[in-house]
Amino acid sequence: MAKTFHRSLIRSKQVMSGALVLLGVCTVGCEAQEVIPPVGSVGMPTHQAVQAPPVPISGRSLLWVALQPYLGQGTTSSRSAPSVRLISAGHQPLLLKDARGDVQRAPVITITWRLVALEEPLQLSRQVAGPFASFESAEQVASQWRELGVAAVVAHPSEWEVWAPQGVQPLPGVDIRLWQGIVSTAVQPVIQGDSGDRSLVGPIQIDAPDGLSWKGGVYLGPFQLQVDAYGSWTLVEHVPLERYLEGVVPHEIGAGAPSAALAAQTVLARTWALANSHRFALDGYHLCSDTQCQVYSDPRQASFGVRQAIASTAGKVLSWKEQPINAVYHASNGGVMAAGSEAWSMESVPYLRAQLDGSVGWVDRFLLPLTERVVVKSLLDNADGAYGQGHPRFRWTRTLTAEQLQQALRLVAPSLSMPQRLTVLERGPSGRVLSLEIRDEGHQSPVVLRLDGIRRHLRQLPSTLFVVEEVGVGVWQLSGGGFGHGAGLSQAGAVDLARRGWTTEQILSHYYPGTTYGPLPEMKDAP
């Protein structure tokens, strides 16, 4: 569990084939609203409730982006978590104002943390499913309960989980653990004032007229320091959507990409942000700024080409049934696109489907589905005619030893002895491995990794498009193609197509068949 809860543990045990139910929060299709109190077993909440952010419903909306989560985490009665140093990027001072109206003006403001006792301890109880390798897989589990009338939510205390009240009918095949605890203390931010230390009450508003210096970049804000569902704090920037793109696009496809590819990436980044604005609703903001979302950093790094791509596509997204699509993308697909259900545990959607990615000659050379090893190996032994083959990981090999496998799986399978067999159990239509079995020398049940869990545990693998060959005792060579999950746009492929003269709309239509490219539709429901 998250280290940010300060609590007395009452009970924690593992239960197989479990379930969950959680609070209702504002997601897509509503303006800001109060959070419905999360109900746990016997009326106990599942977590500390936080008000959800306002939902972005147009291209003029603000995104609440976490520049730094989990602040104050690890504070105890005897020590404080690392302080936060806020620095003005210019001559004008920062203006900090907390919920009581206390104001601090200074070019540099340092915030420390202290642990305070709650007047009334908060009892919590929940069922926890996870951890999951991705938000998408966690959301799929949460959605199954929502279909049964349960308002399940996704949490990210350190990894992706689904939380729910205890006592709900379990879903088949979903493992849970039961947790109860008492929150008796809270982490409180503190600043040094003229008369000594002064405690702050959140949410805390921060204005930076000349911008805020943060991690080597400058951000314009405004900013808010707010508590999350785990008892820690998050520094959030309220950033206009189009400015957010300036901080995303250069880090996703590269500022030197051809203009049509840059514009395609821009449309996808805009679409993805809007379609995923519910991703961190439990913690009171929309998106993170790291690889669990889209990498977002100093918007000043946007080149002229990036700004031109943003301006030329302003307000345009990809939609399906008048809703922004799940606009996933990746570095390289190795010559064949993956269906969404090959990458994550998710419902199939028609615009994320297995499809060969190359010239007519490339497409005619292979026949989907690529479920047989010999056919996948034939594809991996070839490249002529595939789009994006210039990517450095278009083809790759990795060697795994029994010792490496045992080490990689120590958390998920601590009793696993030295692995003896590595076997592909199932492939998807694009040839990607859906389930991978690892057997040891004893009589323990084999470990089976599935979908995004394969790369989550075997981090050496650039993708799940590979074949396995045993090359020695306890040594396997994996030969594969592509970098990333393989669903949606291949950035290497988009660059290749743009250099061949394809337009932005042609590139998007190729990678997301059947979608509509145009002005932002009104958002009513989360995808």
Image (cartoon, rainbow, N blue to C red):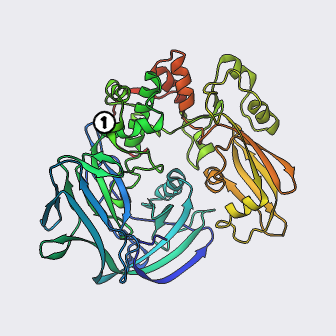
Q: Where residue 100 sits: x, y (%)?
A: 14, 68
From this viewpoint, which residue is outermost toward the right? 473
Horizontal side of 141 relative to 106 (left or right) equals right
- The residue at the point 43 percent across, 31 percent down is 255
Residue 261, given in percent of the width and then of the height, sits at 47, 26
- Looking at the image, the residue that sits furthest to the front is 91
The answer to whether residue 86 is left or right of residue 427 is left
Three-letter code for the amino acid on which mark 1 is drawn? Glu
Examine the image and state in which quarter residue 247 appears: top left
Q: In this view, does 311 lie to the left or right of 423?
A: left
Asked if residue 445 is positioned above or below residue 312 in the image, the reply reads: below
Between 3 and 169, the one nearer to me in the picture:
3
In the structure shown, which secondary structural element does the residue marked by tag 1 occupy?
Answer: helix
**Which residue does the numbered mark 1 point to in the structure image?**
242
Tell me: residue 256, above or below residue 226: above
Residue 50, image x, y percentages: 31, 64
Q: Is residue 324 visible?
A: no
In the rendering, at what x and y percent does residue 527 appear?
A: 44, 44
Query: In the image, what residue occupies the spot 32% across and 76% down?
Result: 186
Q: Residue furthest top?
A: 501
* Mark 1, other Cα within 10 Å: few <14 / some 14–19 / many ≥20: many
Which picture quadrant has residue 195?
A: bottom left
Q: Which of 202 and 114 is in front in this view?
A: 114
